[in-house]
Image (cartoon, rainbow, N blue to C red):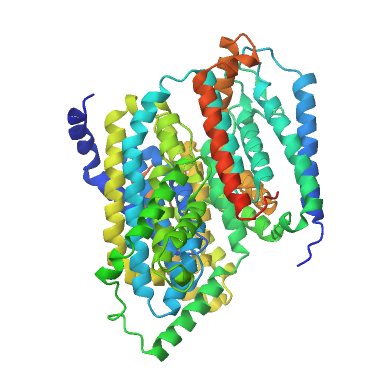
Amino acid sequence: MPLLDLLPLAADIAFRPEVLLAVLLGVFLGVTVGAIPGISGDMAMAVLLPFVFTMDAAAAIGMLMGIYKGGLFGGSISAIMFGVPGTPGAAATMMDGYPAKQAGRPNSALHTALYSSVFGDLAGVMVLIFIATPLAALALKFGPRDFFALYIVSIVVIASLDKGRVVRGFAAASIGVMLSMIGRDPFTGAQRYTFGIPELAGGIGLVPLLIGLFALSEIMIQVGRSFHARVQTEAQRAAQVAQDAGYDPRKDKLSRQEFRSLWRAMTIGSATGTFIGALPGAGATLAGFLSYALAQRASRRPQEFGKGCMEGIAAPEAGNSATAGATLIPLFSFGIPGSGSAALIGAAFIMQGITPGPQMIEANMPIIYAIFILLVLGTLMNLVVSKALLPYYARISLIPPRIVLPIVVALAVVGTYAISNSVTDVWMLVAAGVFGVLMRGFGIPIPALALGFILGPGFERALRQALMLGQNDWGYLLQSPIALAIYATGAGVMALFFWATFRRGQPDAA
Amino acid sequence: MRHDLDRKFVVGACILLVLGVWGLWHTYFGHWRPGPGGGPMAIPRIMFLVLIPAALLMIWQAFRYPESCQTETVPMRVVGAVVIWALLYFWLVRNLGLVSSTAIMLCVAMLVLSPRPMQSLKLVIPVAMLSAGAFWVMFTQIAPVLQVRVWWF
């Protein structure tokens, strides 16, 4: 369909009031939960998944993306104000954000974080819009053995990029794929690993598993922690320091000249975040730290990093936010979610009856382009909402988790049951929660496990179709130039990361 | 700082190893329906072949780099309490109605987690009531898919 015919159709879907409201609500919710240490955007996305059934595709995906975008920025609020990152992605922002606040510039630091976040997010979304469609068109030429190569490379990259836990990443990905094998074999109808339990014949439900792994297990661990105590102590101390120093918020403003000096850091962060975000398995945290390191190297004043330098806030914030759009590139083009958040978006697409993959864009063009429009609008809404509410968001960080966590558990339980009014789903949710706690206890990365579970069925389909075409000759899997190119690219990415890791003298461990 | 060998980590890795060995044995000698493209056991076999060396490497690394192979102590009492709370809440939702059980159970959880329960009452009760109201809006007005009683009466 020509673009000029498509855009009015997409705009018609995207500009419906209920769709815009869903995105706005998502952004607001995302920044709010992101600002509360211990509550992440992924957690909010997971517990809201059941509502996706009752919404139309554009509103549902728009809302979830709004939460994701908002959450990435929200995490920086408590990182700057209290030195406690609201989300793991904001850890790099804290390195200069908190010292900036201690130096009496909290307002400038928060505004730098907001503008950089919006800049990076917009860059990632633009790359997604211009790259996803051509990549998906290319992927239409792929055969089963090429997809098998893509799945193998994705699983290997996902397992390997969690620095310091590579072996555990492989264990997590294989456990995830194994969990997806439970139930009926799609080719023969035979039951696998059901151990005679009829409820397992249909397999493990995607939504209970994701809510259990991402939300319930995290809550079980959070209940025992005391983030709040530190936040409150910091808040009281900060108020006293501000009072003693005669802090005047009117004088703490980001000047135009200062903002202009941040362009280089924001551009470095956006480019790094977009590249990292597009890789399966590499998330916002890695993007933030890598952007910080690169911006420091390129800065004219590298010695000021770590002392409250605005460039040190702009680069990681642009970097982690740029992953929001870029992480959807593999999902939209190949049907492979590259991160935990993309896995949740992928689950929402499946619940809407849209299967992520190369055919997704072509088969659902108006909806996908409406989602592209909403991604841009969501970024702008993030700017407006966050700018207006910035003075109040620091107070949101003070909401005690003991108030929020029970509400999230209740929402998880009722939401999971609401999907199909099935008691089995609730049992699976609780089991997934406990399983997630055990896995976290052993340092097994949950996103790798969840991604293994999501990739498992496609991985199996690709392998078995390829083997059928090759008449059970495993060598057939290597006889495609596209597959070989994918393996070579994967090897290149891995080599790049291992080289970067070893060059910094940080040997990898379990 | 010197780190001792974390036995829990080693036990966990050994469990993964046993699982991997059992699974691989099962894909060769278990009862599988023959199927096209390697059969239903093709992917499980590959995954167990990945799991076994991963588990062996984890055991080796636990001895070689004990500092990076430490398990996080998860208070199992807290985990158990959350599980019991979640299941009790679910049972109440089905027997007592959505709004009433949400309000009651949220009050209980917030008060239990509060360091000074009696002083928190002024905050907890309105928040629990408001949350129950929000649940009513979400699950009966926005997405009326829940097949349970809404009210107590």
Q: Is residue B52 left or right of residue B138?
A: right
Observer able to see residue A301: yes
Residue A224 screen position, x and y as percent = 63, 64
Q: Measured along the vertical axis of the image, is residue A25 above or below residue A453?
A: below
Q: Residue at x 45, y 48 (%)?
A: A45
Q: Residue at x 57, y 45 (%)?
A: A497
Q: Residue at x 21, y 43 (%)?
A: A15
Q: How many marks?
A: 0
Viewer-nearest residue: A292 or B53: A292
Q: Is residue A484 left or right of residue A364?
A: right
Residue B58 screen position, x and y as percent = 75, 45
Viewer-nearest residue: B37 or B146: B37
Question: In the rendered image, which quarter is residue A139 located in?
Answer: top left
Residue A251 screen position, x and y as percent = 29, 81
Observer able to see residue B97: no
Residue A340 screen position, x and y as percent = 51, 44
